[in-house]
């Protein structure tokens, strides 16, 4: 599921939940999405203020990549990830979607996601990869 903040032509804002971006586009094309206050079907997606982390101009995504093998020499994978990726925890899918749709700036992130979130990210065309990390608490 994906949630969008929407606004009608009269300026009313409301939220819409869709199975995926494709379902949203299809409903928009068929004019099935209507404002609950005035029934206007000329709606558009507006940036969500919920959980959007602004990126200051000074902070840019690191130029390093997990594929920079030379930089990994003498450094464990976990150390590399710790130094070059922001840990977004269980918000991984939401943050990845925000970057994919341009709501937030691109940056290296790491976190956790459920199987259904991973399937949704794949359906939306978001590229990601999983690295198995052993639990240290056992």
Image (cartoon, rainbow, N blue to C red):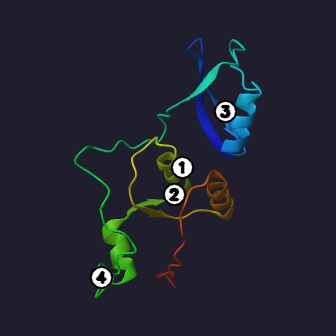
Residue depicted at 29% across the width and 79% down the height: 71
CA gap, disc 3 and disc 4 = 46 Å
Q: Position of residue 100 (x, y in %)?
A: 51, 49
Secondary structure state at the residue bearing disc 4: helix
Q: Position of residue 32 (x, y in %)?
A: 77, 26
Q: Nearer the viewer, mark 2 or mark 1?
A: 1
Residue depicted at 46% across the width and 82% down the height: 136
Tell me if mark 2 has few (under 14), some (14-19) or many (20+) residues whose alpha carbon lies within 10 angstroms of its own: some
Residue depicted at 65% across the width and 18% down the height: 42
Q: Earlier in the sequence, mark 2 or mark 1?
A: 2
* 2 and 1 marks in contact (CB < 8 Å): no
Up the image or down, 42 lies above or below 107; here it is: above
Tell me if mark 4 has few (under 14), some (14-19) or many (20+) residues whose alpha carbon lies within 10 angstroms of its own: few
Q: Which mark is residue 70?
A: 4
Secondary structure state at the residue bearing disc 2: helix
**Disc 3 target residue:** 16
Does residue 42 appear to the left or right of 83 in the view shown? right
Dividing the picture into quarters, in which one does residue 126 lie? bottom right
Q: Earlier in the sequence, mark 2 or mark 4?
A: 4
CA gap, disc 2 and disc 4 = 27 Å
Tell me if mark 1 has few (under 14), some (14-19) or many (20+) residues whose alpha carbon lies within 10 angstroms of its own: some
Does residue 15 appear to the left or right of 128 in the view shown? right
CA gap, disc 1 and disc 4 = 30 Å
CA gap, disc 3 and disc 1 = 16 Å
Q: Which mark is residue 92?
A: 2
Dividing the picture into quarters, in which one does residue 73 lie? bottom left
**Disc 1 target residue:** 97
Q: Earlier in the sequence, mark 1 or mark 4?
A: 4
Does residue 65 appear to the left or right of 2 in the view shown? left
Q: Position of residue 8 (x, y in %)?
A: 61, 18
Q: Nearer the viewer, mark 1 or mark 4?
A: 4
CA gap, disc 2 and disc 1 = 9 Å
């Amino acid at each position: 599921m994906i949630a969008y903040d929407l606004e009608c032509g009269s300026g009313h804002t409301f939220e819409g939940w869709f199975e995926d971006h494709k379902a949203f586009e299809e409903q928009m094309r068929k004019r099935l999405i209507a404002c609950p206050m005035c029934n206007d079907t000329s709606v558009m997606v507006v940036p969500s203020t919920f959980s959007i982390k602004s990126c200051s101009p000074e902070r840019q995504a690191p130029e390093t990549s997990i594929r920079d093998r030379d930089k990994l020499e003498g450094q464990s994978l976990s150390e590399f990830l710790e130094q070059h990726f922001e840990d977004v925890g269980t918000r991984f899918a939401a943050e990845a979607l925000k970057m994919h749709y341009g709501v937030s700036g691109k940056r290296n992130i790491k976190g956790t996601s459920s199987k259904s979130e991973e399937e949704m990210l794949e359906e939306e065309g978001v590229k990601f990869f999983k690295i198995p990390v052993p639990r240290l608490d056992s």
